[in-house]
Image (cartoon, rainbow, N blue to C red):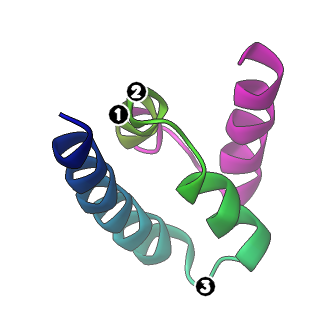
Amino acid sequence: MYWLDSQDKRGLISIIWRQLKRKFGQLNPEVEAQVRGLELASLEELSEALLDFENVEDLKVWLRNRDVIR
């Protein structure tokens, strides 16, 4: 089961990262590290939330809120 979760997470990170780069251009390594550190459930939430982001600051606020909540 762990292997499947690990595979799913890597695939989801790859898709989300490509979407974020396409939407906002190059992002800083700190943001990338925060995205890569998210749990699978949070990545799934981010995959939907990023559609509503208008700028990189929206992403950063979302990430900050995840740190507070979790």
Q: Secondary structure at mark 2?
A: helix
Q: Amino acid at mark 1?
A: Glu
The location of residue 48, given as percent across then percent down, is 36, 34
In magenta, the rendered stretch is: 48-70
Q: CA distance from mark 3 to mark 2?
A: 25 Å
Residue tagged 3: 26
Q: Quadrant of the N terminus?
A: top left
What secondary structure prevails in the magenta region? helix
Tell me the residue at 59%/50% (across/down): 54
Q: Is residue 22 left or right of residue 61?
A: left
Cβ–Cβ under 8 Å for marks 1 and 3:
no
17 vs 9, nearest the viewer: 9
Residue beneath the point at 42% across and 29% down? 45
Query: In the picture provided, is 12 more to the left or to the right than 24?
Result: left
Kind of residue at disc 2: Ala
Q: Residue at x 49, y 36 (%)?
A: 39
Which one is nearer the viewer's eye here, 2 or 26? Answer: 2
The residue wearing badge 2 is 41
Q: Residue at x 25, y 41 (%)?
A: 5
User: Is residue 59 inside the magenta stretch?
Assistant: yes
Give the residue pinned by disc 1.
44
